[in-house]
Amino acid sequence: MADEREDQEWQQEKQRVTKVVDEIGKKITSLQSKIKGLKEDVIDIRRDFWEDVTVNIEEMDDKIETEASIKQQAEFLSERERSHGQVSERLDILHRLKDKPYFGRIDFKEDGQSAEQPIYIGLASVMDEDEENFLVYDWRAPISSMYYDFPPGPASYDTVQENISGEITLKRQYVISNGELKGMFDTGLTIGDHLLQSVLGNQASTKMKSIVSTIQKEQNQIIRNEKAKVLIVQGVAGSGKTSAALQRVAYLLYRYRETLTSEQIVLFSPNPLFNSYVATVLPELGEDNMQQMTFYQYLHRQLDDSFQLETPFEQMEYYLQKQAENYEARVEAMHYKASLAYKDLIDRFLDQLANKGLAFRNITFRGQTVIPKQMVEKYFYQTESTLAIPDRLEKVANWILYQLKRLEKVEREKDWVLEESELLEKADYVDVHQTLQDENQFSEDTFDDYDREEEMLRKRVVAWRLRPLRKKVKQLAFVDPLKTFRKLFSSKERVASTKVTHPSQWQEICRITNEYLKHKYLTWEDAPAYIYFEKSLLGFDAQRAIQHLFIDEAQDYTPFQFALMKKMFPVSRMTLLGDINQAIYAHALREETLLSEKWQEKHERIVLTRSYRSTAPIVEFTKSFMPNGDLIEPFERDGETPVVMELEQRDIMIEKVLDQINEYEQEGHETIALIGKTMQECMDIYDRLRNRIDIHLMTQEAHIFEKGIVVIPAYLAKGIEFDAVIIVDASNDNFQDELERNLFYTACTRAMHQLALFTIGKPTDFIENIPKQQYRHYKVHQIWDKGTG
Ligand SMILES: Nc1ncnc2c1ncn2[C@@H]1O[C@H](COP(=O)(O)OP(=O)(O)OP(=O)(O)O)[C@@H](O)[C@H]1O
């Protein structure tokens, strides 16, 4: 009996899929003819553009009419083009829906209503033929939120006006592909584990996947959060932070579609490789992409070209190699310069500069100083000290521009002007002639015509020569921020240092910093400080258009960097996502990261503890060596325990690594990463393997993530995942301190299905200290002769 009913339901659901797919097909056909019409319109308008506008420029009235006519025609064209864009975007979505129109259903009985209503949920909405009822609801619609938030039973959702409550009487998931129902199951859980199991069991992809059909309840809280000004997400490795962040972008673009566009959203990602990894998720959801960049790229844009900026990865290499001269002082500087104490020092310095110490440049014209810097300085310090420095500089700029006007008059009479007027283009002469004629100052029979022409030419030459200088004055280039900043580190003028606690190596830090700055080299730890300093002097050109800022891998940002961001994006809401266990930059050892609980009072904080990426044995292995690992919950997905290969000698490693790669390839894994700690380590292994197999070395310049075998340092593998991971040197001397522990954790957690670790001699204590049953440990004393097996 039950079977019969199930069969009946199966048939009904099957028919419904077919019906919806048919309806989508009809919509596609009708849109295709519409788009064809629009395309023809656009081509016609472009071709006949000039025929359809009234062009007459003889008389003033006609000129105005002509302009209006062109404008109208251009608007018409752009309106058609826009419609064409919208229709083609909708067509893309419909094509995707035709393949898989929906993935879930809830039957909801609203309080006070007699019957329940089935709600089918998919990537986007589809209406019936009469455009009256929803055949499919967009997953982002308010009503769809219940699918993610509630098991069957009492449930509710918020609309813009009110909260609607009722009961979910059925919750069902579908497997549909090629427009055909392949499977369905009712679920008591939020989203059934078996569906997740099958999604997660697939091979890793070189592109991030959309997770709309299996979003988990706590991820949904991140995606749909609308209240928090700053939302902090602490999530363990593989808990879906990045996935949730991208779905949040799609959600916000849908929720605020009248007011929010993708250009108003910025995502800071950990490395350029990552940009290519996530680039496709949003278009898949039917949205344009947000602005995506690394924080390095962003800072680089804030500086003029004469600066050389260290990358965070270069800083990391410096830190990990532990060899450089002044190593200890620089590491101390990395800690200190990450802190708000350093910002405090700079703020004090800025306060002092309001009264003295700002460095200025001479104003020079044609190689001569026309206003000496002492005069500029004097003028600056005469302006009202209660005003902000940028406002006072504005006043100085106006004063200089006024002086330049006077200078201009004097210069016009000088000999060089006439000489240079000969260098003017012929067109200038014609123009001068024409202008004089237009002004009626030029008549064929007056004898001072020539003088007038010369006067005008002189004016032009001087104005032309002064233009770049004026521009620079307007840009406040008469201030020297770098020279001023360097005073902070000079022994003569150790301004602002009173009352501030300096790190123990301050003298040495000053010396090194000064040395770098002298060469216009900004270390990664000094870049935010310098930019903050420069903008505090010259004014922040805050990006008010940006409404939402997403910061992935937020644990890698320093408090100083965050303070700078708040200044640069003053109106943005922020979503910070990260994992304290993956904090791999030196500053994180001492300074609070942005994810710490300290921030909880001020900001909303969501914690994700379930790890989806790796199989349960890999998660068990990795959680065992993290101090707070007990908070990490594996998602139950079977797999082999990680393997630790302890080799007696280094020279047998290559053969063993090759065997391991081979084994993984045999198992069908397509993305295999050999992860090293430093770039040097990666380059060594790459050099030894490149002639044996097809292998790619990923450097900080790499922008595209492709399938195959790659060698990559752990810090560049951040945020990315691979089918199988091989840690090339997990020996005790390679992973020791706390940062190395985090790097090691980051590296191991990149693996979805398989993890192997090679060591030369004793494995790192991080491995030694975990229960033996969590991994397979092999000691290899000599290389076997392949012939004898
Ligand atoms: N709800 C979900 N449904 C299906 N897959 C999911 C879900 N949540 C996460 N995943 C998968 O888990 C993997 C890890 O997700 P993601 O990269 O977003 O995690 P993360 O927290 O940013 O990880 P990390 O900090 O380690 O870089 C991805 O393959 C993602 O597709």
Image (cartoon, rainbow, N blue to C red):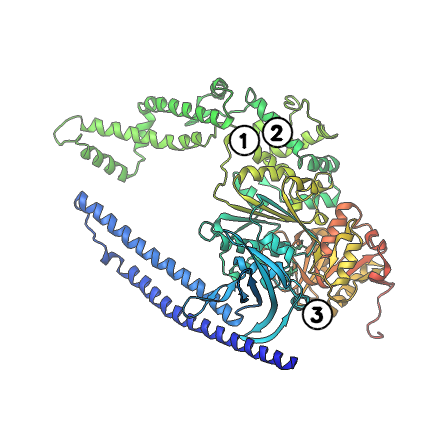
Whole-Å distance between the Cαs marked 3 and 2? 55 Å
Q: Quadrant of the N terminus?
A: bottom right
Q: Position of residue 416 (x, y in %)?
A: 34, 27
Q: Position of residue 29 (x, y in %)?
A: 40, 72
Whether residues under marks 2 and 1 lie with C-beta atoms below 8 angstroms apart, the answer is yes
Label 2: which secondary element: helix
Whole-Å distance between the Cαs marked 3 and 1? 55 Å
Whole-Å distance between the Cαs marked 2 and 1? 10 Å
Residue 280 visible, this angle = no
Q: Which residue is mark 3?
A: 665
Label 3: which secondary element: helix
In front: 565, or 395? Answer: 565
Question: The residue under label 2 is which amino acid type?
Answer: Ile
Q: Nearer the viewer, mark 3 or mark 2?
A: 2
Residue under the point 51% across and 60% down:
283
- Mark 1 CB in 8 Å range of ligand 1? no
Q: Earlier in the sequence, mark 3 or mark 1?
A: 1
Residue 282 visible, this angle = yes
Q: Which residue is mark 1?
A: 536
Q: Quadrant of the C terminus?
A: bottom right
In front: 129, or 66? Answer: 129
Q: Which residue is mark 2?
A: 346
Q: Position of residue 31 (x, y in %)?
A: 39, 68
Label 3 crowd (10 A; few <14 / some 14-19 / many >=20): some
User: Height in image: 526 above or below 679?
Assistant: above
Label 1: which secondary element: helix
Give the quadrant of residue 87.
bottom left
Question: The residue under label 3 is which amino acid type?
Answer: Glu
